[in-house]
Amino acid sequence: MRASVMRHQNEIIARGTTPVGDGGPTVLRMILGGRMRRLREVCGISLEEAGEAIRGSHSKISRLELGRTGFRERDLVDLLDLYGVTDSDERAEFRRLAKQANTSGWWHRDTDWLPKWFDTYLGLEQGAQLIRCYEPRVVPELLQTADYARALLILAHPNEDEESIERRVSLRMRRQEILTRPDPPQLWLIVEEAALRRRIGGSRVWLAQLEQVLSAAEAPNVTVQVLADHVGGPAVADGAFTMLRFGESDLPDIVYLQQLTGALYLDKRGDLAAYRAVANVLSVHAAPPEYTTELIAALRENVPPTLDQPSGIG
């Protein structure tokens, strides 16, 4: 039994000493938390016992293992002692990972207005290797122009002043930099035809936005599929969703569902299987990516003229 525990412990430690990608603090916290959880389980130590070792509770250990909070160095050292990790190099590597995981993301300057639930999503988005999204209402945020985003944000936050709106626009534009960084994530979007037909911000803004979608779709890491209105995408999926996949084997896929005043993060096997199946159905019924250019061109030609004024989402 002891030999088996040692073997599993060494496997977990080996992952802990393998360099991880620069996925941002949120993803690094999840990686470290997952490895510490496996060490605890291999040793047969309960959440309550681990909590006592760091002068805390079982719920604190749970939050640490889920990556919802960072490890203080003292707590990490005490847990490594409890779990029998004695090699100095191995301990140093765990401490290095904890230090990286406790740094702030680039969006920390916006924490005065940024909801905590969205702060979490930004960290996950920055660390994802594949972002798969279905959007029935508007052009997805990672492809929006500044003018299009501004028009949407003014509608969504009618009581905010211009400076606040501009901060939101700036954040959205900064997020898009992941698509052009070295080793960018793969972005796979399925967008409803109705979303592309809505002239958010007026005709000039709308035309520029369609050009932006076409330009983005030419990138090797971006796939855009258009789902025709008659297919009835909203009947297949209840609403927009995003699936995130990470390069680290320690991390499960995550489904992100944004709501009016919060968000859901799903990582249970059944939930993931259900959303993966829906994404596959939508992808099969949407036009192949190679037809996106001509479909958007047809939308531009066939939509009758309207008053050039901001329009709503609905």
Image (cartoon, rainbow, N blue to C red):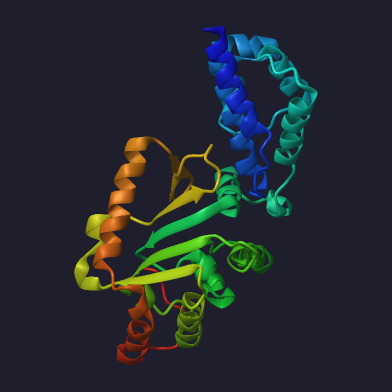
Answer yes or no: is residue 313 visible: yes
| Whole-percent x, y for residue 245 in the image | 48, 49
| Whole-percent x, y for residue 66 in the image | 56, 31
| 242 to 262, vertically: above or below | below
- In terms of depth relative to the viewer, which is nearer, 206 or 256? 256
| Whole-percent x, y for residue 298 in the image | 32, 88
Q: Residue at x 48, y 69 (%)?
A: 222
Q: In which quarter of the image is residue 307?
A: bottom left
Q: Residue at x 58, y 26 (%)?
A: 11
| Whole-percent x, y for residue 174 in the image | 65, 64
| 166 to 71, vertically: above or below | below
Q: Residue at x 33, y 55 (%)?
A: 239
Say how many tags the image has: 0
Residue 251 shown left or right of residue 243 in the figure = right
Residue 235 shown left or right of residue 185 in the figure = left
- In terms of depth relative to the viewer, which is nearer, 37 or 166? 37
| 185 to 57, vertically: above or below | below
Query: Which quadrant, please, contains the C terminus?
Result: bottom left
| 52 to 59, vertically: above or below | above
Answer yes or no: is residue 238 visible: no
Residue lying farthest to the left in this orientation: 230
Q: Quadrant of residue 196?
A: bottom left
- In terms of depth relative to the viewer, which is nearer, 182 or 145? 182
Q: Which residue is drawn at 62% across and 13% down?
A: 50
